[in-house]
Amino acid sequence: MTLTRKLLAKWSGGASRERVYELADSFEIETNEHYEITRRRVYFDDVQLVTIHRERGTLYLVFTGLAAAGFAGLFALIVGFGGIAAVPAASIFGVIALALLIAFLLRAILGVDIVTIFGRRSKALLRFRVRKERAREMYEHVCAVVREAQNVAAGFSPPAETPPTDTPPMPPG
Amino acid sequence: MRVALAYAGPQCPRCGTTLAADALRSGEIACAHCGKSFEATAFDLPQRRGPQIADVAIAGPEGSNACANHPRNAAATNCQRCGLFICSLCEMNIGTGSFCPNCFARMRAEGTLPTAVTRYRDYVSMARIAILAGILIWFFAPLFGGLALYYAQKGMKQRREEGRSRAGPIIATVFAVLQILGALSLYAFLVWSFFRVPGGKP
């Protein structure tokens, strides 16, 4: 079973990794949980709705914000009690706090762009953290692919291009 | 309007509420449940055509075997597993031969139909876990390294069959070999240091 597929988007969550591929007739969602892979498909001719929106994720912001504040507090506490001599020991907490703060700010400022493909039986989510233009491009690409496949399935062919009506008349003779 | 627990068609991408049929349209849509908006493109599902079903119904069982499930339909083929005569309505063929619906469901549940399987073992992840276990429990590293090597080879075969990149299993193989060699060297060092004579040649 050799698959020719194109990677559209990937996402790593807390407990699983998800990749969305484009096949010849469908979108394939590959979810990797620990050591098991689950594959689902949304067929082009089953797609009913494609949406795009941006979200921040309240839970993520609360978690990273609180964790950043907690580690920064630990850093301040150790430095406060130990003085300058304790900075090297406390720096690990400072580094963790800084990383969490960057994650918090990135999410708060940029958000995550999500393209959702709703089929009749399943759905696929394409998430984009930083590349916003790519999210828009992918939304348009998904819509175009689905539209083309559904037109083919319905036996519809786009009308042939007609010459513009304001074509100047042919010269006499 | 309800928040869907199981997937039941297009939903609000923000709150997960199943959208009403009149909300399935292109443009900016505001969810009636959460009030937040999102951009959408709606599609009309193409009507599925089934000429073969009509043909079978017209043909009837005259002069041919009848379908076991639909006595008015002529059998188009027979199930490769149980031999039951089945019509085009009953035939389940996903590129692995014709089966009746019951056999298809059983084989799918057993996982014996390769093209109907949707859950796989990720052997490369298993190899990574074995390598990590070998690092944590270093005394048993050759065992875990061997296990990682085995999983990496299975992962290699899996990726080859799927036509995917084999970088992951190759890296896992290298780490597994290094782990085995490192652990064996450590064993050798321990044995050497145990048997050596203090202050002289071993």
Image (spheres, grey):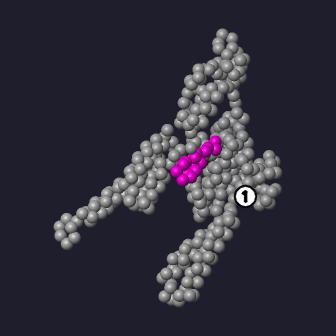
Q: Nearer the viewer, residue B202 or A19?
A: B202
* Residue B80 appears in the picture as rendered: yes
- Residue at 54%, 34% in the rendered image: B112
Instruction: Give the class, few, some or many, for how many residues have Cα within 10 Å of label 1's Cα (few <14, many ≥20).
Output: some
* Chain identity of mark 1: B
- Residue at 58%, 57% in the rendered image: A15
| Residue B7 screen position, x and y as percent | 71, 47
On screen, residue A77 versus residue A165, left or right, reads left
Residue furthest out toward the left: B201
On screen, residue B9 versus residue A102, left or right, reads right
Q: Is residue B188 magenta?
A: no
| Residue B58 screen position, x and y as percent | 72, 17
- Residue at 60%, 41% in the rendered image: A25
What secondary structure is marked by label 1? Answer: loop
Q: Is residue A31 magenta?
A: yes
Q: Nearer the viewer, residue A129 or B142?
A: B142
Residue range of the region highlighted in magenta in the rendering: A28-43
Under mark 1, the amino acid is Arg
Q: Is the magenta region chiefly helix, strand or loop?
A: strand
Residue A26: quadrant of the picture:
top right
Identify the residue position indicated by label 1 in the image: B14
Residue furthest out toward the top: B63
* Residue B167 appears in the picture as rendered: no
| Residue A39 screen position, x and y as percent | 58, 45
